[in-house]
Image (cartoon, grey):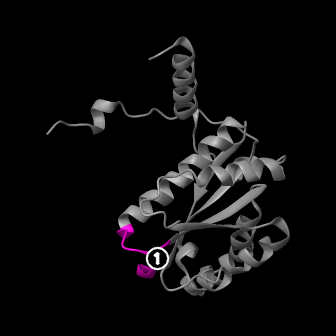
Amino acid sequence: MDSTADQEVLDATLTLIHSRQHVSTKRLGDPGPDAAQIETILGAAGAAPDHGRLNPWRLIVIPRERRHLLGEVFAEALVERDATATEVQRQEARAKAHRGPFLALVVARLDPALGETHPQERMISAGCAIQNMLLVAHAMGFGAGLSSGRALYSRQMRTLFRLSANEQPLCFFSAGTVTTSKASRPRPAAADYTSTL
């Protein structure tokens, strides 16, 4: 460390990383991030590592006035999996689309025509972009989390978001104000996942 200021930056960064936790969309309410804060969160994604500068992922924001379209996809995908799904179950599936003030879909771009970078590297880049958004939302005082589920990989989802054959939906990113808190889960120690060659 060159200075006390550097140590303070490191300490603050480590505190941010270790205090962040997943927040379910069920526990995210208003207020959500405003337009400027959303721009900052999305902009942080662009700082992710990107071998070959391919921009091998993209983000699709789902505004509240369009959430009903996603809700219908959740309901249709449920019925496709389970033709006996009741109307109550279909309504519950639709309701998932309306949770959380801010919602975006993360999509990996795996088209070979983009460049020679291996698909695995592209997925790593997308993961880093997601982590950047999670950390920035947390630094702003918001809760944030990721969600997926079987509907994410459905034909209806691909159609709604106009995904190409070489695009893969990865997860939904949500952010908002935490309405109910949960105890932090214990994190593994470095020795739990590290070995030496």
Residue at (52% x, 77% y) in the render? 153
**In the rendered image, is residue 24 in sight?**
no
User: Is 162 located above or below residue 105 in the figure?
Assistant: below
Quadrant of the snapshot with the C terminus: top left
Q: Amino acid at mark 1?
A: Leu
Q: Residues within 10 Å of mark 1 (few under 14, many from 20)?
A: few
Place residue 120 in its image quadrant: bottom left
**Residue at disc 1, secondary structure:** helix
Residue 76 vs residue 143, the one in the foreground: 143
Indicate the position of residue 51 as horizontal and vertical percent values.
42, 60
Residue at 51%, 13% (x, y): give it: 3
Q: Which quadrant is home to the N terminus? A: top left
> Is residue 190 within the magenta segment?
no
The part of the chain drawn in magenta is: 109-119
Q: Position of residue 58 (x, y in %)?
A: 59, 67
Q: Residue at x 55, y 29 (%)?
A: 13
Say above or below: 63 vs 185: below
Name the spot of residue 57 as percent of width and height, x first.
54, 67
Q: Read off the residue under disc 1.
A: 114
On the picture, is 176 further left or further right than 129?
A: right
Reply yes or no: does residue 110 show up in magenta.
yes
* 125 vs 195, nearest the viewer: 125
Q: Residue 159, percent across and down? A: 63, 86
Quarter holding residue 99: bottom right
Q: Nearer the viewer, residue 99 or 36?
A: 36
Up-down relation of residue 14 to residue 102 (above or below): above
> Measuring 50% from the left and 86% from the top, which residue is drawn there?
165
